[in-house]
Amino acid sequence: MSDNELGLFLRNRREALAPADVGLPAGPRRRTPGLRRSELATLAGVSVEYVTRLEQGRDRRPSPPVLSALADALRLAPAERIHLYRLSKGADGSFTCMGDAQVNRLVRPTVRALLDRLEPAPAVVLNRLGELLAWTEGYERLVRPLGLLDGDPPNLAQFVFTDARARQAYPDWGRVADEQVAALKQGPFRADPHVSQLVDELTVTAGPEFADRLRSVPGLPRANGVARLTHPEAGALRLSYETLELPADDDQRLLVHLPADEATGHALDTLTGRRPGALRALPTGA
């Protein structure tokens, strides 16, 4: 288990940037991906030694101005900047607001009403543990045959890592597994006893498939994209998804799926028993 989440995040984002992304010449062929530490140091106005210390976890308390400079140099999006700040607070032990927070499993009536308005789209409300709390009938018809709703309560992370049916359901299982780990690791997750307990449980029950990702996958899952699903009744599906964060007091998120192509749209219409075209496809090249 790595406890250097700040260093992991910085290294991951550095290696994801090409020199052209930050206005630098590509230069000779590179043996490693992304920016060099020296290039990041120059862009952020710090020493190479300091970048090395941060990535290796030998220095975990960068000042706010340094964090801002690193965020600028790495071209971080607003959500990534918040994540970086939270990781720095977690590293020095000062980020404790989640430590005593209970897991919210109550879905507000207005959120349930919103789910009703989303029919027949497959939509679900989850909490920070990946527990499925409420969903549309369209979601029920989509995932019930996969076995995703068999848990008590159903938990997306546990299904992906501990249920053999998940590998049949998700052709891109590795990518889905990465996303589930990233979702659990947002912020200083070890400061949250509930997430930490689930992480420890999955480390035992899922073994290296989970533990290796825990060491290498940084936080911040993709908020939107396209997921492939193999359905026992409808066959191969391509689903566009969008994640909407509910207010902080809810500590929940709303995940909505829409067909990414016409074939998936027709299949979902059949699954949900709706008229043809009830769910309009959102074509995408992803």
Image (tube, grey):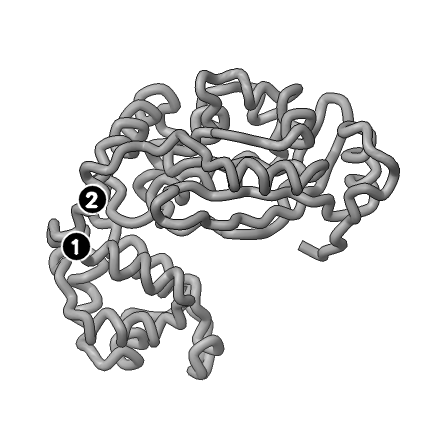
Quadrant of the rendered image containing residue 270: top right
Quadrant holding the N terminus: top left
Task: Tell me the number on the disc at residue 186.
Answer: none
- Which residue corresponds to the image point at 32% horizontal and 76% vertical from the top-left? 39
Dot 1 alpha-carbon crowd within 10 angstroms: few under 14, some 14 to 19, many 20 or more: some
Q: Amino acid at mark 1?
A: Gly
Q: Residue 69, position in %: x, y?
A: 27, 76
Residue 271 versus residue 2 in the image, above or below: above
Residue 41 versus residue 274 in the image, above or below: below
- Which residue corresponds to the image point at 20% horizontal and 44% vertical from the top-left? 3
Q: Residue 87, position in %: x, y?
A: 24, 54
Q: Amino acid at mark 2?
A: Asp
Verify CB contact (< 8 Å) between mark 2 and mark 1: yes
Dot 2 alpha-carbon crowd within 10 angstroms: few under 14, some 14 to 19, many 20 or more: few
Q: Which residue is mark 2?
A: 3
- Which residue corresponds to the image point at 76% horizontal and 22% vertical from the top-left? 233
Nearest the eye: 195 or 26: 195
- Which residue corresponds to the image point at 19% horizontal and 70% vertical from the top-left? 64
Q: Residue 172, position in %: x, y?
A: 59, 38
Q: Is residue 223 left or right of residue 285?
A: left
Nearest the eye: 258 or 50: 258
Q: Residue 102, position in %: x, y?
A: 27, 33
Q: Is residue 178 left or right of residue 148?
A: left
Quadrant of the rendered image containing residue 7: bottom left
Quadrant of the rendered image containing residue 28: bottom left
Q: Is residue 57 left or right of residue 165?
A: left
Q: Which residue is mark 1?
A: 57
Gap between marks 2 and 1 measured at Cα: 8 Å
Q: Residue furthest front?
A: 109
